Image: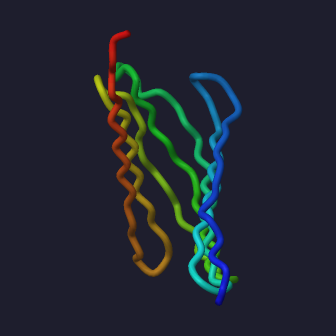
Amino acid sequence: MAETLAPMGGEGWIGTDFNKVMAQVRRKSDEGCHQRWRHEFLYDRPIPHLRYFDWQAGARVDIDSGQLAAWAAIGMQGLLRTSSILRTLYVRDGGCVAKNLRLVRFVLTHA
């Protein structure tokens, strides 16, 4: 029986609140030796006159069992009253387009 590797990843950034470079790495795998890696490198800057929202632009590289796919990325990230939103659009050669939408809700409690 093949061993399944747990998903893993990490992210970090360097810079200030007004100019930062972010890096994210994620790994997914299934039974056997098939692994998918996603690396994202994004430049992040606040959107003028739109508090708590940043625009992001950069690149994404997918490595799928030795196959490489490079994408251009543009998106936005921000905070709403009770949630965080991340929306990114990816484009690569051959007319391939992909999107990512992540919404995380916060639960506020009183002590």
In the image, what residue occupies the spot 35% across and 30% down? 106
x and y, in percent, of residue 50 in the image:
34, 23
Q: Residue at x 57, y 79 (%)?
A: 30
Residue 66 drawn above or below residue 100: below
| View extreme (bottom): residue | 1
Q: Quadrant of residue 52?
A: top left
Left or right relative to 77: residue 9: right
- Total labels drawn: 0
Is 46 rendered above or below residue 30?
Answer: above
Q: Quadrant of residue 43?
A: top right
Residue 108 location (% of width, % of height): 33, 21
Q: Residue furthest left?
A: 81
| Colour scheme of the picture | rainbow
Give the quarter of the image for residue 11. Answer: top right
Quarter of the rendering occupied by the C terminus: top left
Q: Residue furthest top?
A: 111
Q: Residue at coordinates 66% horizontally, 86% vertically from top-left?
A: 2
1 relative position to 110: left or right: right
